Amino acid sequence: MSVYQRLHSLGITLPPVATPAAAYVPFVRSGALVFLSGHIAKRDGQPWVGQLGLTMTTAEGQAAARAVAIDLLGTLEAACREAGTDLDGVRRIVKVLSLVNCTDTYTEQHLVTNGCSELLGQVFGPAIGAHARSAFGVAQLPLGACVEIELIAELG
């Protein structure tokens, strides 16, 4: 099954690449690697504001991380097209780095990040979608967003 068939079966339509909010680009290619800039969680087109352990539950954080993954896939698709391929040309999701806006006592950042990691596994399958990962708790994120995630992928 192709990546696009999996996306369709999950009811996911990829968004266009968001315009950067500051002095950076959405992605950079270096050889076969594509580095995607951090994407903040959005709901209804607006920053998904909240703090895990205070105004949000872990389940809500997972949903936010899943939403970020969908936005990352839209950007990854644009990077693939620039490279002359599409999402089926992704050889490997290499690394995910997740920042979780949370209280200083919150300890479930890894579970929040699963919202992204699990979707990548569903979309690309275990051989391509399994990745290295880091999840950090931070005191604040841009625009008060609850989650920000960046991604590194290898193209075939």
Image: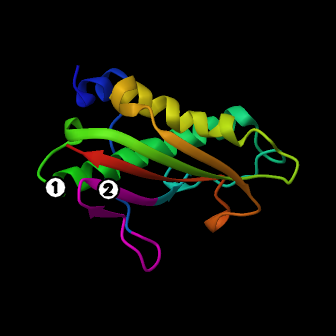
Task: Please report the bounds of the magenta region as a residue range.
Answer: 20-37
- Membership of 36 in magenta stretch: yes
Q: Position of residue 27 (x, y in %)?
A: 34, 63
- Quarter location, residue 92: top left
Image point (46%, 73%), residue name: 21
Disc number at residue 34?
A: 2
Q: Relative to 72, is 125 above or below? A: above
Q: Is residue 11 visible?
A: no
Disc number at residue 63?
A: none
Query: Judging from the image, what secondary structure is the residue with disc 2 in?
Result: strand
Q: Relative to 131, is 1 above or below? A: above
Left or right? Give the position of 139 relative to 121.
right
- Membership of 19 in magenta stretch: no
Q: Relative to 3, is 107 above or below? A: below
Left or right? Give the position of 155 relative to 106.
left
Image point (36%, 29%), residue name: 123
Left or right? Give the position of 111 relative to 10.
right
Q: Position of residue 119 (x, y in %)?
A: 46, 31
- Quarter location, residue 125: top left
> How many angstroms separate mark 2 from mark 1 (CA)?
10 Å
Image point (66%, 63%), residue name: 141
Does label 2 or label 1 sit earlier along the sequence? 2
Nearer to the camera, 62 or 84: 84
Query: Judging from the image, what secondary structure is the residue with disc 1 in?
Result: loop
Disc number at residue 83?
A: 1
